[in-house]
Image (tube, rainbow, N blue to C red):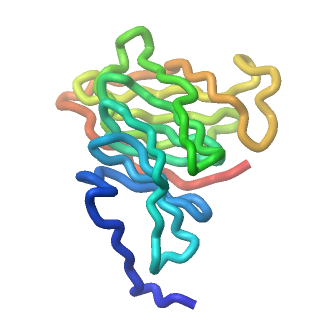
C-alpha cells in the first residue's frame, strides 16, 4: 500500500495553470486554463494524463457527482459535463439562466430531500441556488445518475463578488 505521503506530479505541458481538481474512483478531473482534463490515477504514483480533453473558455472550479462533472464556467455559467467515460468527457449542457448566470467562479453540489442542488458563486451576480433534479421537473429522476435539468430556485445578492462556496456535508442517496 502507498504511504499517505506519496505524491505524484503530472507535469506541463499536460496541465496548464490548474485551478481545481476533483477525484472520483480511478480518475482525477482537473480544471485548468484550457478546460477539463482527466488523469488516470489507478496507480497514484504514476498518473496518466488522458490525451483527449474538453476545451472550455473558462473552467474555474469542478465538482464531480456520479456520471457528471459540474464546472463553474465563468461567462458560460454552469457547464455540466458527462464524465461517464472519463477518457472522452463531453458537454452535457451549459446553463446560464438566460444570460443571468455569467460569472460562475465556484460550484458545490449536494442533496436536499429528493433533489440535487448546485450552489454557484456567480461573482458579481451573487450566490445562485440551482435545482438539478426533482420529482416535479423530472418524473423519472430516480436511479443512479438522473439527467440534470437545472433551474434557478433562489439567489442572493452579495456585497462583494461571490467567489467561493463552502462545502457542506456529503450525503448520498
Residue beneath the point at 46% across and 70% down: 47
Q: How many marks?
A: 0
Q: In x, y percent, where is residue 155?
A: 40, 22
Q: In x, y percent, where is residue 5?
A: 40, 86
Relative to 156, 4 lies left or right: right
Residue reaching furthest top?
A: 98
Of residues 18 and 102, the one nearer the viewer is 18
User: Which quadrant, please, contains the N terminus?
Assistant: bottom right
Residue beneath the point at 70% across and 26% down: 134
Q: In x, y percent, where is residue 56?
A: 37, 33
Q: Is residue 91 above or below residue 136?
A: below
Residue reaching furthest front?
A: 51
Relative to 40, 53 lies left or right: left
Residue reaching furthest left?
A: 160
Relative to 96, 64 lies left or right: right
Q: Quadrant of residue 88?
A: top right
Of residues 39 and 138, the one nearer the viewer is 39
Residue beneath the point at 47% across and 60% down: 39
Q: In x, y percent, where is residue 104?
A: 33, 30
Residue beneath the point at 44% across and 28% down: 78
Amino acid at each position: 500500500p502507498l504511504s499517505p505521503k506519496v505524491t505524484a506530479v503530472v507535469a506541463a505541458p499536460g496541465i496548464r495553470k490548474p485551478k481545481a481538481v476533483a477525484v472520483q474512483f480511478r480518475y482525477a478531473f482537473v480544471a485548468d486554463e484550457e478546460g477539463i482534463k482527466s488523469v488516470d490515477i489507478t496507480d497514484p504514483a504514476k498518473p496518466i494524463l488522458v490525451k483527449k480533453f474538453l476545451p472550455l473558455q473558462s473552467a474555474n472550479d469542478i465538482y464531480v457527482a456520479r456520471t457528471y462533472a459540474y464546472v463553474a464556467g465563468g461567462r458560460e455559467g454552469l457547464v455540466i459535463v458527462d464524465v461517464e467515460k472519463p477518457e472522452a468527457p463531453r458537454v452535457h449542457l451549459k446553463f446560464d439562466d438566460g444570460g443571468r448566470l455569467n460569472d460562475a467562479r465556484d460550484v458545490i453540489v449536494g442533496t436536499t430531500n429528493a433533489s440535487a442542488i448546485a450552489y454557484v458563486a456567480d461573482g458579481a451576480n451573487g450566490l445562485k441556488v440551482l435545482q438539478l433534479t426533482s420529482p416535479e421537473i423530472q418524473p423519472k429522476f430516480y436511479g443512479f445518475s438522473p439527467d440534470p435539468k437545472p433551474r434557478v430556485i433562489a439567489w442572493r445578492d452579495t456585497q462583494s463578488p461571490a467567489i467561493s462556496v463552502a462545502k457542506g456535508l456529503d450525503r448520498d442517496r
